[in-house]
Image: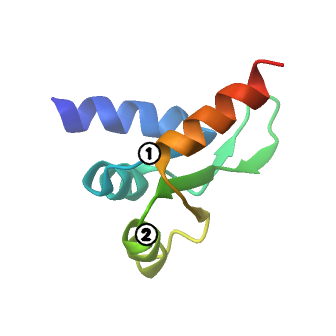
Amino acid sequence: QAQDAMREHARKATTVIALATQLHSIAFGNMVPSYQVMKDGVVRPVFFYVVDMSEFSTDKLANRGSAQAVGILTNVQDFMVNLWNNLSK
């Protein structure tokens, strides 16, 4: 049931930010399409960011062909604090 729920969300995603958990980042990355066709017919890429202290998740996704996976190598807490501070202005 959990995998089916993840697949449903993955099909709708236009931007994914995977935070810290390698297992879930890789699993979701394997489900996310590389592009979406929008309601107006425009084809756009699905942006996929992996935020983690290790390169493992990004490397694993890149090795399976997820060219859209971009690694942000930092502490997740620092990333969230910076994101919050910059979005709340």
Near-viewer residue (21 or 44): 21
Q: Position of residue 50 (x, y in %)?
A: 51, 56
Task: Name the colour scheme.
Answer: rainbow
Q: Which residue corresponds to the image point at 38% horizontal and 49% vertical from the top-left?
A: 20
Quickly name the residue at label 2: 61
Quickly name the residue at label 1: 19
Secondary structure of the residue carrying tag 1 is: strand
**Three-letter amino acid code of the residue under disc 1:** Leu
Q: Which residue corresponds to the image point at 43% horizontal and 81% vertical from the top-left?
A: 63
Q: Which residue corresponds to the image point at 66% horizontal and 26% vertical from the top-left?
A: 84
Near-viewer residue (60 or 83): 83
Does 59 sit left or right of 23 as displayed? right
Q: Residue furthest bottom?
A: 63
Q: Quadrant of the C terminus?
A: top right
Q: Quadrant of the N terminus?
A: top left
- Real-space Cα distance between discs 2 and 1? 14 Å
- What crowding class fits label 1: few (fewer than 14 Cα within 10 Å), some (14-19), or many (20 or more)? some
Near-viewer residue (22 or 28): 22
Please tell me whether residue 6 is drawn above or below residue 20 in the rendered image: above
Is any part of residue 6 visible from this angle? Answer: yes
Q: Earlier in the sequence, mark 2 or mark 1?
A: 1
Number of callouts: 2
Does 22 sit left or right of 74 as displayed? left
Please tell me whether residue 87 is drawn above or below residue 38 in the rendered image: above
Q: Position of residue 2 (x, y in %)?
A: 19, 32
Is any part of residue 16 visible from this angle? Answer: no
**Residue 79 occupies quadrant:** top right
**Residue 15 occupies quadrant:** top right
Secondary structure of the residue carrying tag 2 is: helix
Q: Position of residue 9 (x, y in %)?
A: 43, 31
Near-viewer residue (81 or 34): 81
Nearer mark to the viewer, of 2 and 1: 1
